[in-house]
Amino acid sequence: MPNIIAVSKTFEEKDIIPLVEYGHDHFGENKVQEAFRKWPKIRALKKDFNLHLIGNLQSNKVKTAVSIFDYIHSLDSLKLAEKIAKEQNLQKKKLKLFIQVNIGNEPQKSGINESELSDLIIFCKDLNLDIIGLMCIPPNDQNPIKYFKKMNELNNKFNLTELSMGMSSDYLIATENKSTFLRIGTNIFGKRI
Ligand SMILES: *Cc1c(COP(=O)(O)O)cnc(C)c1O
C-alpha cells in the first residue's frame, strides 16, 4: 500500500487539524510561505507526522523549507542541491528528498530532464543528500501509464526505492504502477476555490 500524502494547500488550519488529530501521518503543501504560515501552529499541537513540500522550491526559500518540512519532492537542479546541503548542515537536519523528473519533457514544467538525471543523482550523493526516490507530474492531457512505467524504470536504474506519483485523478493507476507516495488533495479536502 502506498503512503497517502494529504495535500492541504489552500485549506486552513481548521480543516487540517481534525485529520492531524485523527493520526494521519503525511501532509503536503506546494508553497513554502503558505506552509510557514500554517504548520508551525499545527506542530505545536501534535508532532508525529511528516510534512512534504510538493511544489516548486526557489533557492531563497530553502532555509525556511529545510526548517519546516520533513520531505522535499521538488529537487531538480544542481544549484538547489547545493543550497539544500548547505542549509541542512547549518540547521543540523537531514530531509528525505525526491528528485522531480520532467517525465513528459514539457517546456513549461519544472523537473530535471531525463538526460540530466544521472549527473544530478551523482552530485547529490557526493553532497551526502538523502535521495529516496523520484517524483513526477505527468502531462495532464494524456494517459499517465507510460510515464509511470518510465518512472519505475528510472527508479530501478538508479537503485532508488520510493516513487512520488499519483494525484486525485490518477491515483489508482499510480498505485497499480508501484507508487509509494500518492499526493491527494481534492479527494480528501474537497474542491479548491
Ligand atoms: C495540488 C497538488 C497535488 C494534489 O492534487 P489533487 O488533484 O487535488 O489531488 C498533487 N501534487 C502536486 C505537486 C500538487 O501541486
Image (tube, grey):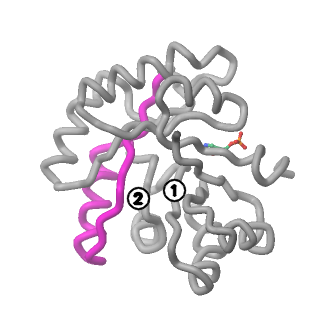
The x and y percentages for residue 70 are 43, 64
Vertical side of 174 occupied by 17: above or below: below
Q: What stretch is highlighted in magenta?
A: 76-103
Task: Estimate the x, y position of residue 191 in percent, counting from the top left.
Answer: 85, 47
User: What amino acid is found at the position of numbered circle 2 in the picture?
Assistant: Ser
Q: Which residue is drawn at 28% across and 28% down?
A: 116
| Residue behind mark 2 | 59
The residue shown at (64%, 14%) is 143
Disc 2 is placed on an element classified as helix
Say whether marks 1 and 2 touch (CB < 8 Å).
Answer: no
Image quarter for ligand 1 equals top right
Residue 192 placement, left or right of 90:
right
Image quarter of residue 32: bottom right
Residue 98 forms part of the magenta stretch:
yes
The relative height of residue 89 versus residue 99 in the rendered view (above or below) is below
Nearer to the camera, 182 or 95: 182
Q: How crowded is mark 2: few (under 14 residues within 10 Å), some or many (20 or more)?
A: some
Instruction: In this rendered view, identify the residue nearer to me: 154 or 182.
Output: 182
SS category of the residue bearing label 1:
strand
**Residue 124's spot in the image, x, y percent?**
22, 47
What residue sits right under mark 1 in the picture? 53
Q: Measured along the vertical axis of the image, is residue 141 above or below residue 69? A: above
Q: Residue at x 43, y 57 (%)?
A: 71
